[in-house]
Image: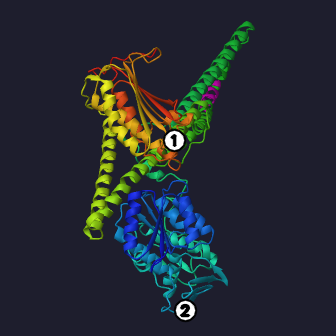
Amino acid sequence: MSTARGLVVVAEDDPAVASLLRLYLSRDGFGVETYGDGTTALQAIQAHRPVAVVLDIGLPGTDGIEVCRRLRAAGDRTPVLFVTARDDEIDRILGLELGADDYVTKPFSPRELVARVRAVLRRSQPDDDAGSRRALGAVVLDLTRRRAWNAGAEVALTATEFDLLAHLLAQPGRVWQREELLASVWGYSSTAGSRTVDVHVSQLRAKLGAGCPIRTVRGVGYAADELGDKNGGNGGETGSDGTGARPGRPADRRAGRGTVNAAARGRMSVTTRITLLCMGVALVAALLASVATARSLAAADRVETATSHAANLDRTPAQRPLRRARAVARRPLVARSLLMSVGVGLVVGAAAGGAMASVLTRPLRRTADVARAMGAGRRDVRVPVEGPPEIADVAASLNDLADALQHSESRQRAFLLSVSHELRTPLTAVRGFAESIADGVVTGEEAARAGAVVLAESQRLERLVRDLLDLARLGAVDFRLDLAATDLSRLLDDAATVWRTRAAQRGVDLRVERPAGPLVVRTDAARLRQVIDGLAENALRATPPGAPVVLALRGPAPGDPFGTRAVVQVRDGGPGLAVADHAVAFEAGVLGERYRDDRPGGVGIGLSLVQGLVQRLGGEIGVGVAAEGGARFTVHVRDTDDRGPGAGAGPSR
C-alpha cells in the first residue's frame, strides 16, 4: 500500500485515536495502516518499510519503547514519532535516547501531528541543493547521501541527529541557544522542551566519542568547534535530577539544618549533656578520692600521735612544736592532692564524655540527615544501621519507613500515570474529531460519525471523572447515604436488564441467580447499585466472548460474617486473578498496571471505589476463584445504621 507521500504505520491501541490519525494522515496524502499492539506493528514495519512510524508508548504486548529499541538495534533508521498520554520526562528522555525523532503528548492537535510527521520526513530526506559535504575535525558529513563519518569510520545517525550536527557544523564556533536549535532543526517549539536538544547532543557525543566537535556553553547552549568538550560533558548542565545537586547527596543539607525549630535552639545538645555528665561524674569521683586521701592522712597523724603518747616521746615541751609543724606541713599536700584529683577528673570526664557522645550522636546525626533528605523528597537514601542497639533500632525503623514511602509513592505515581492516560486518550479523540468537524475535514455522514465518537468519548470522560470524585469523597465525614428499605431482588433484576444488553453486544452470556421472593435490607439503593454496576463492568471487561458472567443474590448462611442480611456475588469466566492478586485487588492502579499488557482493563479505580462504597454501607467484600473459572467478588450486605457505616455490625463468627 502506497501513495505519493508514502506509507505511515500507526501503532495505537485506542480505536478512536487511531481512526483520528488515519483520517488526518490520509487527508494529507499518506497511506496509513493502523495496528493495536506492538508485536503486530513491528512485523508490519519490517514487512512494509514505511516512510515513518507513529508509536504509542503504552501498547499492549510489546510496548512502543521496545518496538523502537528493536528497530534501532536492527539498523532500521525509519523516522519514529511517539504519541502517548504519559507526560513523564523520564519516558520522553528514554524514547529519544532510543532513537525516536519526536515526542507528542496527548491530547494533541491532529494538524500539529501531521506537521510534525512532515518535518521529520524533511529531515530524513536528502537535500540536493545544500552543499555536498561539511567537515570539522575528524567529523565529515555527506549532506546529499546523509551519511556521517568520524575518523574515517561511518557512524549511523538518526534523521534528527544528522540535522542537528549538520546545523552546528554549518557555522563553526557560533553559539546556538537551545530555543534557536529547536526552531531551526525541529521547525517548531517542541513539546518536550529544551531537554530534547540535550538528549540528542548526548546521543551524538556517545556515537562520535572523543572526536565529537560539540561544545557546551553553560547557561546558553551549544557550539561546534575542533576543541569540542574535552571534559566529556553531558548534554545538559544539571545533575540527574535536574536540580544541579550531585546524585547521592541530600538535596540541601545545610538548608535543612537551618530549619531547626526555634524553640530548640536554646536547648543543650546531647553531646554537651553527655560531656557535662561525664565531667560531673569524674569530678565527684575526684573529690571523693581527695577526701579519702585527706582522711587517710588525718588517720595517720592520729596514729602517730597515739604512738608518741604511748612512748612518752612528746611529753617534753620541745617535742610538741615539732609534732605540730609536721601536721601543718601535711596540709599543702592535701590541697595539692585535691586540686590534682579535680584536674585529672575534669580531663578524664571531658575525654570520656566526648568519646561517648561521639559514639552515640554520630548515628543520630546521620539519621537526622537522612530524615531531612526524605523530607525534601529523596527516597533513595538510607541510614547505616550502627551504634548501640537502641539507636540501631531507630535507624532500621527509619529505613523501613523509607521503603514503605518509596513503595507507596511508586504505586501512586503508577496510578496517576494510568489516570492521566485514561483522561488524555479520550480528550485526544474529542479534540481531534471536533477539529475535523470545524476544519470541514468530515462532512455529511462522516460528520455524524465523528459527532458520535465525540459523544461516546465525552461519556467515557464523565464516568471516569465521576468515579474519581466518588473515590475522593469516600473518606469525607459528610458522605451522604440515602437509607431506606430496599428489595435487593428487584435491584439485581434492574441491573441485569442493563448489563444483559451490553453483554450480548460482546457475545458474553449473562446469567442471574436470585431467590424467588423479595430480600429486603436497609441500605442506600443507589450506592449498592453502583457497587453491582462496578463489579459487572469489571467482569464484562475481562470475560471473552462465549464465556459467562453471573450476577447472584442469596440470603444469609452459616459461616457468613455476623450481621449479614444478604450476599451479592459477581462471577465471570475470564482469566481470573492469581492468588497473590487477591490481597491487592482493591488497591487503585495495582491490577491495571500488572495486567496492562495482557488483558483489557482500566486503571483500577472501579474496584477501589467498590470496596470503599461497601465499607461505607457497613458491609464486607472479598475476592476468590469462581466456579466458572474466573474471578469471584462477594459482597456481604448488612443493614446500614443511621449512625454510620457498620455501626451495628459485630464481630465475625
Relative to 418, residue 317 above or below: above
Q: Amino acid at mark 1?
A: Ala
Callout 1–callout 2 Cβ contact below 8 Å: no
Looking at the rendered structure, the secondary structure element under dot 2 is loop
Q: Is residue 334 magenta?
A: yes
Specify few, some or many for label 2: CA neighbours under 10 Å numbering under 14, 14-19, or 20 or more.
Answer: few
Which quarter of the picture shows residue 291?
Answer: top right
Residue 589, given in percent of the width and then of the height, sits at 45, 43
Q: Residue at x 34, y 43 (%)?
A: 468
Residue name at image x 67 percent, y 18 percent: 296
**Residue found at the far right of this picture:** 311
Mark 1, mark 2: which one is toward the viewer?
2
Residue at 45% x, 57% y: name it: 13
Disc 1 target residue: 402
Observer-nearest of 171 and 498: 498
Magenta part, dominant SS: helix
Q: Residue 503 versus residue 450: which sits nearer the camera?
A: 503
Residue 244 visible in the shown view: no
Q: Picture coordinates of residue 150 (x, y %)?
A: 63, 82
Q: Nearer the viewer, residue 275 or 618?
A: 618
Residue range corresponding to the magenta coloring:
330-339
Res. 132 mark? 2
Residue at disc 1, secondary structure: helix
Tell me, yes or no, whether the highlighted magenta stretch contains residue 188: no
Going from the N terminus, do you reach mark 1 or mark 2 first? 2
Cα–Cα span, label 1 and label 2: 58 Å
Q: How far from the left and from the top, in percent, is residue 240? A: 51, 60
Tag 2: amino acid:
Ser
On residue 253, the disc is none
- Please state if 625 lies on the left or on the right of 152 as rendered: left
Report x, y in % for residue 350: 58, 36
